[in-house]
Image (spheres, grey):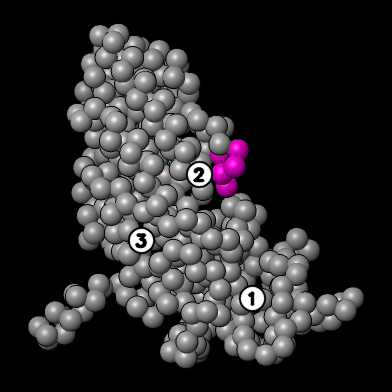
Amino acid sequence: MIISSISPSFDNVSSIEAVNDASDVQLIESLVARHGAPLMVLDCDSIRHQYRLLQAALPGVVLHFALKPLPLASVVRSLMDEGAHFDLATAGEVDLVAAESVPADRTIYTHPIKRDADIRAALEYGCNVFVVDSINELEKFIRYKDAVEILVRLSFRNEDAYADLSKKFGCSAEAAIQIIQRAFKLGIRIKGLSFHVGSQTTDPEKYVNAIEQSAAVLTQVSALGLPALSTLDIGGGFPVGYAEEVIGIDEFCRPIRQALAELPETVAVWAEPGRFIVAPAMINVSSVMGQANRDGKQWYYLDDGIYGSFSGIVFDHGNYPMDALHWEGERFASVLAGPTCDSVDVISEDIMLPKLKNGDLIVTRMMGAYTLATATDFNFFRRAEVVTLNEQPVMDQVSSFNAG
Ligand SMILES: *Cc1c(COP(=O)(O)O)cnc(C)c1O
């Protein structure tokens, strides 16, 4: 509830000033008084809300949350209770869902390049759907052919995305047909096709084109007399609003729904959302460690930076909405720097901020995806502590209160 008004789980709110209210300020100050700074405050209500929004925008599509942007047990638990499935990419992610007792038949393993030990770790857990994008990778499954089902990952280039995931992975339609023919000869079951149009894709036509081209491959497979494919996995990439707004998810998904409606009814559709589910669920709270005036500009040194929670600025083109917790008053051109001794550790070169004292707090929203996950403890600055709010849905809280 509370943080969702600061870190809005609804779409398209870009100004923290518009949503701060007194109870939010008090909550943040009390969390810092209890835990210290820097903090990453996670609101599980927001996770559930985003999951429901995307499920409503893509009815009938089985959503597999990709753990990669925020691999936390509390996130897995919140989504498991919503009925989510999970998209795993490493043995470490297998360990995380296994520790939370996620049923293995709700998981898929989508890294296109795996070691034999990775495959075995997933199979031992009970996950048996894997992704390949080459004959070399397919042949790793010869020895497991009776246990596994395979998705073949197609590649559709998208240079506008935050991460063009079709540069490093995926194959052409022609190569996919060759892989499927080879699998048929080897007796390996091909379940379907997958793709990833690129993270933070803001143009739904990228999905529409990929769905249409995938549909053509499905048709070609049947025409060649190969066993029909049962599944199309449309990947992740669904966008959220950072400093710039994006269109709401229901409108974004409208052309995608239309394209999916053209698929044969026998084809099940899956997706692998990551960022969309978790980005709005976390705010960062860091405090001013010190300050200096350099060349007429006020520099503030925070206790979190590029090597910590703000790593997404480097790895994810992050442009997060941020402001002082107490934002009232005249503003001055300022620089926000991270705590390490490295000169690249600057969060913002040009931000208008009120005059801050040491110890004052800076709040940054939309910090759930690809932030903490890529943070380091360079210079021995510890990663921000995660404080989790609303782990139990409100309904559960009421009923356990009544039961008590
Ligand atoms: C990273 C990744 C995702 C999640 O992508 P988002 O852009 O965060 O939605 C899904 N599937 C695969 C295979 C990935 O590598």
Marks 2/1: CA–CA distance: 36 Å
Marks 2/3: CA–CA distance: 19 Å
The residue under label 3 is which amino acid type? Gln
The foreground one among 277 and 122 is: 277
Q: Nearer the viewer, mark 2 or mark 1?
A: 2
Q: Position of residue 213 (x, y in %)?
A: 41, 25
Q: If you read the primary sequence from the N terminus, does the residue marked by circle 2 or circle 3 appear first?
A: 3
Q: Quadrant of residue 289?
A: bottom right
Q: Quadrant of the N terminus?
A: bottom left
Q: In percent of the image, x 18 and y 81: which residue is there?
A: 398
Task: Say what secondary structure mark 2 lies in.
Answer: loop
Q: Nearer the viewer, mark 2 or mark 3?
A: 2
Q: If you read the primary sequence from the N terminus, does the residue marked by circle 3 or circle 1 appear first?
A: 3
Residues at circles 2 and 3 in contact by the CB criterion of under 8 Å: no
Answer with left or right where residue 106 lies relative to residue 284: left
Q: Position of residue 20 (x, y in %)?
A: 50, 83
Whether ligand 1 has any atom under 8 Å from the Cβ at mark 3 is answered as no
Q: Residues within 10 Å of mark 2 (few under 14, many from 20)?
A: some
Tell me if residue 33 is in the magenta stretch.
no
Q: What residue is shown with label 2?
A: 203
Q: Which residues are the magenta region?
A: 159-164
Q: In percent of the image, x 25 and y 9: which residue is there?
A: 225
Q: What residue is shown with label 1?
A: 303
Please give the label number shown on residue 50: 3
